[in-house]
Image: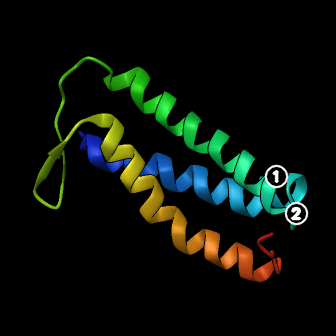
Amino acid sequence: MIPAELLVVALCLVMILVSYLHVYPKVAGSNFNKLAAYDLIAAGIALFIVGYKYWDTGFPFYLLGLSLNWFWYTLIVYIVLETPVALWYIKKHNIRFK
């Protein structure tokens, strides 16, 4: 059986890669506002999927020895995995912050 933490990491990684490599270049391009809006939607979908499975179960997720609930674990993992990909995308598409 695959640990729940690994499933959440895999889900976040797949969503981030599909978003930044396939979806965002088509729908957001180099527009920062569109990128931010679509990224909030993608993060919300990841939180919804994990929440649907683990809401009100009391299942502990462990991150660096800390016990977290599903929401905080998913949010932290998503942000940590997304940051280098987002920086790469911003640099590649020459996105300027206005």
**34 left or right, relative to 12:** right
Under tag 2, what secondary structure? Answer: loop
- Of residue 22 and residue 74, the one placed in the foreground of this image is 74
Q: Which of the 4 quarters of the picture holds residue 1?
A: top left
Q: Position of residue 25 (x, y in %)?
A: 84, 62
Does label 2 or label 1 sit earlier along the sequence? 2
Q: Is residue 2 visible?
A: no
Under tag 1, what secondary structure? Answer: helix
- Residue pictured at 71% horizontal, 53% vertical: 36
- Residue pictured at 59% horizontal, 56% vertical: 16
Contact (Cβ within 8 Å) of mark 2 with mark 1: yes
Q: Which of the 4 quarters of the picture holds residue 3?
A: top left
Question: Which numbered circle lies on residue 34?
Answer: 1
Q: Position of residue 57 (x, y in %)?
A: 22, 19
The amino acid beneath tag 1 is: Lys
Question: Which numbered circle lies on residue 29?
Answer: 2
Q: Position of residue 32 (x, y in %)?
A: 79, 62
77 to 95, vertically: above or below: above
